[in-house]
Amino acid sequence: KAGVTQTPRYLIKTRGQQVTLSCSPISGHRSVSWYQQTPGQGLQFLFEYFSETQRNKGNFPGRFSGRQFSNSRSEMNVSTLELGDSALYLCASSLAGGPRFINEQFFGPGTRLTVL
Amino acid sequence: KQEVTQIPAALSVPEGENLVLNCSFTDSAIYNLQWFRQDPGKGLTSLLLIQSSQREQTSGRLNASLDKSSGRSTLYIAASQPGDSATYLCAARSNSGYALNFGKGTSLLVTP
């Protein structure tokens, strides 16, 4: 069974540009979450989608947005990039919805974004 | 807000030693707790998931325990090997949220 895939694996952008990252969850998984990982802050939750609906959002500015498609694939977009957006962006998928389910999360390899 | 702390931040042990990694969390209303491994520049690999109703989980040489009342979880690694060298992350999911709240991790080095 294929794992979580993320594209692209590496990106270099300049300040002010925008970027779109893509995540394909494990087949059958309907929940997709996004996390940002930096050396200083560690792993921080961005948002979570289930059945094309954003259910929860972390404490990030509105420049960070996302969406989920009917096939559960998800994209996240960052507009007006800042130097501080340089990070590893990780996507995770889980089988079912809601916190009342056994939601073991499986992570992809990440997209390394560098903002110059 | 759930705060997760991992101690120590770094650990170096000789091959063959048994070791314990610690994780503490502030909100005892925890739904589950998950331990991950991260190799440099890579994504996270799920090691063990403990539901709030469970006290421990085992997989091979790994054993994770959960004590909600004290807000603690431990990951026990038996007979450590150089291939165990990685960063180990603990993440707690509260009853009220969908997000995993991560600790900063313990960087483990197992020397031959």
Image (spheres, coloured by chain):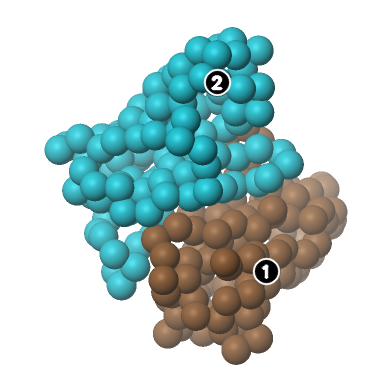
Q: Colour of chain B?
A: brown
Q: Note whether A7 is above or below A15 in the view shown.
A: below
- Which residue corresponds to mark 1? B23
Q: In which image quadrant can residue A96 be found?
A: bottom left
Q: Position of residue B111 (x, y in %)?
A: 82, 48
Q: Could you tell whether A30 is left or right of A88 in the image?
A: left
Does residue A110 lie above or below B81 as drawn?
A: above
Q: Quadrant of the N terminus of chain A?
A: top left
Tell which of B19 and B89 is nearer to you: B89
Q: How many marks?
A: 2
Q: Amino acid at mark 1?
A: Cys
Chain of the residue under label 1: B
Q: Residue at x 71, y 69 (%)?
A: B22
Per the image, label 2 sits on a secondary structure element best described as loop
Residue A49, image x, y percentages:
30, 47
Colour of chain A in the rendered structure image: cyan
Q: Is residue B82 visible?
A: yes
**Amino acid of disc 2:** Leu
